[in-house]
Image (cartoon, rainbow, N blue to C red):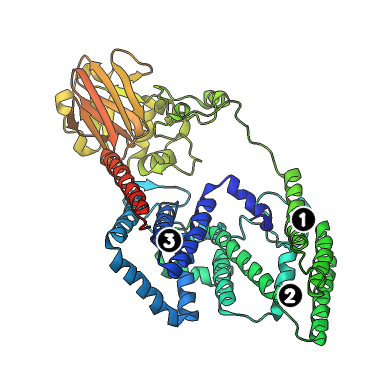
Amino acid sequence: MLMFSSVGTNIFNDVLPVLIMVAAIWFFYFLVGFVQTQGKKFFAGMTFCLMILVTMFLPFYFITLLSICALLFLILYPRDVKRVGLLFLEFNRKHKVFVLFCVISLLLALVPGVLWYSDGKSGEYLVSWRQTQEGNAVALTSEMINASGIIGPFSMESLFSGLAYNNVGAYYLPVWCVVVFLLGLIVKIDKRSVFLWGAAAILILISLGDVTPIYPFFYEHVFFFKLYRNLHFLFLLSIPIIVLLVVGQLRDFLKLNPPSPGQQKNLIIYIFAVHVSFGVFLSLLHNPLKSSYAILVLSCIFFLSYFLGHFQKKERIVWAFLLVLISAQSLEVFSYMTRNASHWFEYSQKPYSSKESSPKFKFVRPTEEEKATDRRLQGFGDIDDTSGFVLADENKYVGVKWPYLLLSNIKEDVLKDYVRYKFVAYDQVKPFEDGDLKALEKFFAEKPNVALVPSEGAKREAALTKASSRHNPPDFISQEGPELKVTDFDLNRIEFQTHFDKEKFLVYNDSYQSDWKAFVNGKPAKIYRANYAFKGLWLPQGANTVQLFYRREREFFNLFLIVYFWYFMFYLIWSFKKAKI
């Protein structure tokens, strides 16, 4: 990555490309090792790499790479396809229990992604800035995906010049890579080179977005191309392939051994001509890097000296030359980036602890001014108020359908005064039709002592109608007291105790989503969609213990995963000690 300029610095602020690239590189290492030896350790390595890749933000980047490699392998090595397939079948026959464990582990790793995709189709989740006509919050429009191609995030206007002004994300092509590529043109092309060229070229062409017809074709005909979040990740996957290709060309070129003095002379002339021609090309550009010319001179000296026999039995000199040629220009580019990059991050002055990352519950959400003050006082890892309702229309990760629609149709100054309070206790409810948005805005402005629920939730209104209560304001609970006390809180659950002098309809101003479940005094209770976008439930008179959970069953599934994978790890350790892996 060092050879590819400040694009490589993105690995320090975005862990996804790192995990995708590292796991992909190791997968192919284990794959080659398995084909060569059929060792269980290589099969286990492939399994763990695939588990990492399928649990990433999206596994489809790697699936695209793997599909491209499989297609090229089928075209270039048709006779080896059957042999490799038989190797896998024979391995499965000999190690059925081991393979079964690996397959089950991979399938379990797929579960979160499958659930995420199915949840996106439910209609309750959305990400407002990327929602498409596909009916799935996971999908993006072609225009949005195209904006994340390499034409967007990476500065590609000038590959060899103007880099003294570059910033994070600028892409340049190292001069020496071009030199090696040009010199390698006289080397015999083998299937391995064609394979690497093909894989890198296809990935780059797709990452260009609609600049070529390739990506639009895949977007229309391959479903997961609608799910890409960052198209330029495909370009990042091509970089290790390009590095392998350049290194392979360098190796093959250095293996050249001209059999006659005449051919050696021609090779020397070719080396000199390549360097001079590329130097002339650089001189015609605007503001090329200063190190470019120095790299060309050193490169020319290196190759001429190598083929004239001056480096025989002097490997240390060869390695020193290669180190300078590889690193010099990259170091210059990074020095410019360090000088020009913005430095706006605030660094923590105290060590991070897991306790600080636990969400804190507040009965009243802070105002924007209070929030700004809290943010300045927060330490690294602190989680700000996170009860599930984001009062910011510009926030692109709203997440749930009903709050987004509420924010889109109700004036914020009307809504924010109401939604500051997380608990509101009402005496009555009445039915509300979702399309009556004018009445909804009036409701939030006037704050009557009547909660709004869909028609099926208002059936108990008749039993609760009291003329006097309509004129009393609802109880906006601003702090802990005898009526309500929060005893446990996390992002996916809350537990509190109540003690009202009469039956109440309690609205918890947290985003409504149908997978939340409620228990009152240990018994299941119905959660209503209250006041259009929030959670509401009936509470009987007197003392009550209320628990709200979001998909509690998945917590048990997580426990199962922990137990299973610990068992799997002990099985692998036992197999290793038995010299079976």
Quadrant position of residue 49: bottom left
The residue singled out by tag 2 in the image is: 183
Q: Is residue 361 above or below residue 17?
A: above
Q: Give the crowd class for mark 1: few <14, some 14-19, many >=20 residues within 10 Å.
A: some
Quadrant position of residue 213: bottom right
Question: Residue 216 bears which disc, if any?
Answer: none
Query: Helix or strand or loop: what does disc 2 sit on?
Result: helix
Residue type of the residue flagged with mark 3:
Phe
The residue singled out by tag 3 in the image is: 42
Q: Nearer the viewer, residue 285 or 324?
A: 324
Q: Residue 209 placed where, x, y %?
A: 55, 65
Which residue is found at the position 44% from the left and 82% from the top? 79
N-terminal of the pair, mark 1 or mark 3, is 3
Residue type of the residue flagged with mark 2:
Leu
Query: Rounded to the nearest whole Å, what is the CA distance between mark 3 and mark 2?
Result: 36 Å
Tag 3–tag 2 contact (CB < 8 Å)? no
Q: Residue 350 placed where, x, y %?
A: 58, 25
Which residue is found at the position 62% from the left and 80% from the top? 189
Residue 558 is at least partly visible in this image: yes
Q: Is 12 on the left or on the right of 99, as rendered?
A: right
